[in-house]
Image (tube, coloured by chain):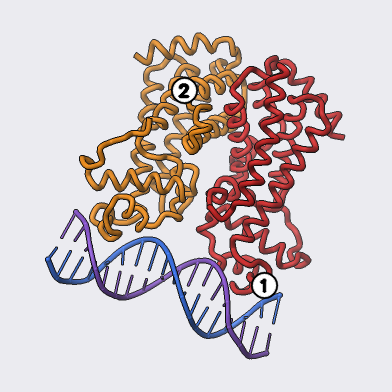
Chain colours: A red, B orange, C blue, D purple
Amino acid sequence: MTTELSTTTWPTRELILLEASRLFAVRGYRGTSTHDIAAAVGVRQPSLYKHFASKQEIAEELLRRDLTAGIDALERMAADGGGAAVELYRYLQWEVRYVRSTPFDLRALYLDEILDLPEFEEGRAMNVRYSMLLRSIIERGIQSGEFLDLDVGFACQVIDAIVLETIRGTADRSAAHAVDEPDLAAGFLLRGLLRAPSRLTRVRGAARTLDR
Amino acid sequence: MTTELSTTTWPTRELILLEASRLFAVRGYRGTSTHDIAAAVGVRQPSLYKHFASKQEIAEELLRRDLTAGIDALERMAADGGGAAVELYRYLQWEVRYVRSTPFDLRALYLDEILDLPEFEEGRAMNVRYSMLLRSIIERGIQSGEFLDLDVGFACQVIDAIVLETIRGTADRSAAHAVDEPDLAAGFLLRGLLRAPSRLTRVRGAARTLDR
DNA sequence: GTCTATACCCGGATAGAC
DNA sequence: GTCTATCCGGGTATAGAC
């Protein structure tokens, strides 16, 4: 499962992103020094600055790539239609698969305080855009009566919580088997949101046909 | 709601804990300097070291107090009995109320990487104890048939996720109204866990009588 | 584009007077 | 128990040779 890519073929810039994401995930953004990153890549610390203008730019690039992927996925699901429940279910499945297949370790990006640092304005803006897209699906589901008449903010928080827990789950492999099954997380959430939980099987079926 | 305590009467040691928890929450543990804490308290940086041997000890004291409270609450609920569902429901309600009433800002303790730092072995040990107590309630609920036959690890993760989101929710007051209602989070979780969600009203009633 | 050397700052902690 | 002064280590980033 761990992407065992022949490192030799990768450009240094990509290697920096890869190793930085892993170190950030374990030691935090602030806890990771540029020296640590350089050592993991196999170069000297000042060499990093030929590829990135600053440590911050490394994290920004990671954020940009991940948030772009998430936003694209949400827009794709919304465009495909099928109703809020199907769109949300498909997105959650995509998210779990994505988190578990990307070579980058995404934990630091959202579990660390990176997005709270004043200098990461761009990342915050993209994150807001992502949240809005997710929120609009929820709102549509509540208005159409597919979902229970929950507070929209609460529903968003619950989804955020599960997505973050999925990302956190990539930490220790002992707990990994739990939330990693794409259907487990998506199924639990929809059972909690759907007005008629028995519809879940129908949602699953509709999602499967759309996924091809 | 914000505890407006007349600071003058508080011993310096308590003030340090209070301000440190707030700074840790906003800037992270590593991102907060001892100088920042001292400035917030209104003393010079070296004066902190008359009350705590190190910055680490400040965070340790905060962790110790919070985890002790959580462990005590879980043990109390388990001792009171009433079945896994009632015990879990009561604990979740207690947790939400506790998070929102404590003068300390708990975010950094569990959302920051503090518990991952090698030097916080004591906190990690207490956290394991807390997790075990919670897990044993879940296991009991699954075995007795009160809960759905979910993977125990998955159920624990979901509960963790909601509790963490509650703590995170104390961040911006705009989102605070969402998960802060003690019954919202507890109710959502139990609806997702109970084999017969219609039992929720009965659980609520049993919890209410026990709470007096 | 990688290296060595280094400038520069900041943070944690101690010494010692009051 | 608070202060001023200071040490020391570590981290980001730059200069300049190769």
Q: Position of residue B18 (x, y in %)?
A: 33, 43
What x and y, as percent, mark residue B8? 22, 42
Q: Position of residue B183 (x, y in %)?
A: 49, 20
- Which image quadrant for residue C12? bottom left
x 46%, y 53%: residue: B117
Residue name at image x 64 percent, y 51 percent: A122
User: Residue at left 47%, top 29%?
Assistant: B134
The x and y percentages for residue A107 are 60, 48
Helix, strand or loop for disc 1: helix
Q: Would you identify the image quadrant in which residue B50 lies?
A: bottom left
What separation in Å lies between label 1 and label 2 (alpha carbons)? 52 Å
Q: Which residue is mark 2?
A: B182
Q: Mark 2, chain letter?
A: B
Above/below status of A63 relative to B72: below
Residue nearest the viewer, comparing A145 with B184:
A145
Q: Is residue B131 above or below residue B23?
A: above
Decide: few, some or many residues near mark 1? Use Cα within 10 Å; few <14, some 14-19, many ≥20: few
In-front residue for pair C7/B133: C7
Q: Amino acid at mark 1?
A: Lys
Please name the residue that numbered disc 1 is placed on. A50
SS under mark 2? helix
Three-letter code, disc 2: Pro
The residue shown at (63%, 37%) is: A163
Q: Is residue B126 left or right of residue A192?
A: left
User: Is A1 placed left or right of B15 in the picture?
Assistant: right
Disc on res. B114: none
Chain assignment, label 1: A
